[in-house]
Image (tube, rainbow, N blue to C red):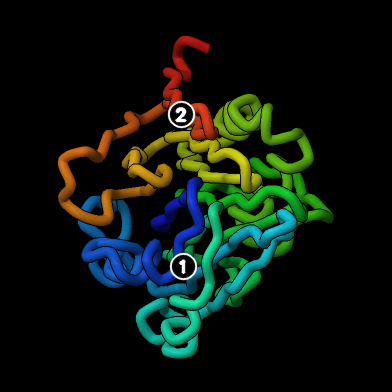
Amino acid sequence: MCRHLAWLGAPRSVSSLVLDPPCGLLRQSYAPRRQKRGLLNADGWGVGLYGPAGEVARWRSARPLWSDASFASIAPLLSSGAVLAAVRSATVGMPPDETAAAPFTDGRWLLSHNGKVSRAALPPSPAAESTCDSAILAAHVFDAGPDDVVATLRAVAAADPDAYLNVLMTDGAQIVGVTWGDELSYLVEPDGVVVASEPWDDDPRWVEVPDRHLIRVTSAGVTVTDLELT
């Protein structure tokens, strides 16, 4: 399992989203508070963000987030109105290199997968950035189209009923998240919305998104849909 978050709103520094919160991704890399499977997330990390013209940029590593001093020195200088970041706890047998670290991209969307799925349930995809399960799953979501992410996950779950398929993604204008085996939480701030595997502090305004729900964040606000009703 992994931990991830997405931000949509006014530009914020990557440091303020990833490193600075008291219980943010940095702490979640070594001491997550709500992680059900796995004790820490030391198998890499990644940050994706959008530039002024909507261009996608990523910084990924196979090292633990807490050990990367160069990223800590640069993160305060990087800012964006749309950011997706993740820390990784690798499934046994999956590759350990940085290509297996989320977020994955098709050039427009950024996607992170928190969970695991048998690769036998995922037909090989030449578009996958890695041979790990998350990268192959991302390629299938991109291929089918992000608007059909729920249908894609249902098909994968039918092939692997034991899969955990928690997905968080953004195209720079919206956030889409699916809870499938775990929860998400979101916080509406005056300047934007953050969606995360777990709250980055103890602010009582955090709202939980239960399992088997879809969350969508746009400039118009936040909507949460029960997948059992769709």
Residue 107, placed above or below residue 72: above
User: What amino acid type is highlighted by mark number 2?
Assistant: Gly
Mark 2 crowdedness (10 Å alpha carbons): few <14, some 14-19, many ≥20: few
Q: Nearer the viewer, residue 62 or 49?
A: 49
Residue 64, placed above or below residue 23: below
**Quick one: label 2 or label 1, which is nearer the N terminus?**
1
Q: Residue at x 44, y 34 (%)?
A: 180
Mark 1 crowdedness (10 Å alpha carbons): few <14, some 14-19, many ≥20: many
Q: Residue furthest top?
A: 229
Number of numbered discs on residues: 2
Residue 31 placement, left or right of 87 = left
Q: Position of residue 202 (x, y in %)?
A: 16, 50
Residue 27, placed above or below residue 136: below
Q: Position of residue 186 (x, y in %)?
A: 34, 40
Q: Residue at x 41, y 71 (%)?
A: 15
Circle 1: element type: helix
Circle 2: element type: strand
Q: Residue at x 50, y 46 (%)?
A: 8
Q: Position of residue 74 (x, y in %)?
A: 49, 83
Q: Residue furthest bottom?
A: 69
Which disc, if any, is residue 221? 2
Q: Nearer the viewer, residue 170 or 37?
A: 170
Q: Position of residue 20 (x, y in %)?
A: 31, 70
Residue carrying label 1: 14
User: What amino acid type is highlighted by mark number 1?
Assistant: Val
Are the residues flagged by discs 2 and 1 in contact, CB closer than 8 Å? no
Task: Indicate the quadrant containing the N terminus: top left, top right, bottom left or bottom right.
Answer: bottom left
Which disc, if any, is residue 153? none
- Residue 26: quarter of image: bottom left
